[in-house]
Amino acid sequence: MHSAVHDTIATVWRLESARIVAAVARRVRDVGVAEELAQDALIAALEHWPVNGLPDKPGAWLMTTALNRALDHLRHRQMAEARHGDLAADLEALQAHVVPDFSDDLDRQREHAVLGDDLLRLIFTACHPVLPADARVALTLKLLGGLSTGEIARAHLVPEATVAQRIVRAKRTLADAQVPFELPQGAELAQRLASVLEVVYLIFNEGYTATSGGDWMRPALCDEALRLGRMLAELAPQEAEVHGLVALMEIQASRTAARTDAAGEPILLADQDRMRWDRLLIRRGLAALERAQALGQPARSYRLQAEIAAGHARAHRAADTDWPRIAALYAELMRVAPSPVVELNRAVAVAMAQGPAAGLAIVGPLLADKALQRYPWLPAVQGDLLRKLGREDEARAAFARAADLTTNEREQRLLRQRARGAA
């Protein structure tokens, strides 16, 4: 019984933790403290729910408990610091069930109500320029994506201890700098937007292909990233990269129903039933891509990736895919935003356009890249290309190595099947 309750708690926490941290942060105005108070609510659930049973609204229970912890924190802080100004006002407002926020008046003057969203405030706070770029990404993935330090480390191909240190230092830095929990404007908005877009896309990617666990996808994370992306598009309508990111996520999300079979096992792109792709999301994605292109700004990372995704979306059959065009887009992406993962994807496109030997020639140097030593899709791609060249023993060894590297159970089963020679 307790095991089932604990599983439920874990699921609810994964879905609600970002909103809870954001709501508490708006009250206590300290991201690190907000996370601790939210964790206190989680501990309370672990203590009470197995004994008293699940509440009717688990998410609301966690939120209420966390806000009560915030109220207690403000009381204690007020007494300890003997400050009766701002904190007293916060305390009075909380007791009256009013949301206190020093920027509420400013929000009411803004054109879009979307600007008052707690989650957007949390992202922009965690992506403040007082933090180095890698710390911004790690902290926001922890707070909004609900990812563990291990999952973040695997997503960034760095040691787990490094990520843990980044997160601790980031929270301390934000507290020491007294970074306000608010949305930036003007030049400051543009300065922080790139980090925010990166984080939103990483959250989407964790939902699209989970780095660990028993499910291949975590659709709730994809939905949250899409929601945030659409809000950012309203916040910064003249930024082509925002529309490019939204286009990319809409088109990628359109494949969700076709990416797994009835048992939840993965179905790779080439084998998907494209009739199950969500045409509404594709239309939304293509429209967002057109908005990005219409702004006339130089093509950058997200727009180029969206154009690649659009190439797949426009092909009614896998055989209709314009692989030379996609390979060319990956080459341009390598010029604009070079990375070993982009180069690996380019290898796949080149293999489809020019043959597996051409793709394998690109994969070869990547095998020595230290950043990809723990990346399972490098040997998986290698195995696929070796199999197409008839080098079966080498292909099986590559797929087995890929299976050993992945921590996602569904992905691991797929790769072990391929290691045994299954299609």
Image: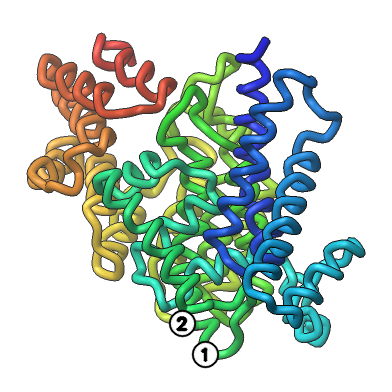
Q: Quadrant of residue 242?
A: bottom right
| Residue positioned 32% across, 42% down in the render | 154
Secondary element type, mark 2: helix
Amino acid carrying mark 1 in the image: Ala
The local crowd at label 2, few if under 14, some if 14 to 19, many if 20 or more residues have their Cα within 10 Å, is some
Tell whether 202 sits left or right of 260.
Answer: left
The residue closer to the viewer here, 293 or 208, is 208
Q: Is residue 183 visible?
A: yes
Please provide percent x and percent y for residue 74: 70, 64
| Residue positioned 25% across, 28% down in the render | 405
Please tell me the numbered disc located at residue 187: 1
The residue closer to the viewer here, 65 or 304, is 65
Please tell me the numbered disc located at residue 275: none
| For residue 241, above or below residue 372 | below
Amino acid carrying mark 2 in the image: Gln
Pointer 2 residue: 191
- Which quarter of the figure is the C terminus placed in? top left
Tell whether 106 sits left or right of 203.
Answer: right
| Residue positioned 18% across, 35% down in the render | 356
Please provide percent x and percent y for residue 96: 92, 64
Q: Residue furthest bottom?
A: 187
Tell whether 260 sits left or right of 160.
Answer: right
The image's colouring method is: rainbow
- Which quarter of the figure is the N terminus placed in? top right
The residue closer to the viewer here, 140 or 410, is 140
Q: Quadrant of residue 274?
A: top right
How many badges with numbers are in the image? 2
Secondary element type, mark 1: helix
| For residue 64, above or below residue 291 | above
Disc 2 + disc 1, Cβ < 8 Å: yes
Q: CA distance from mark 2 to mark 1?
A: 6 Å
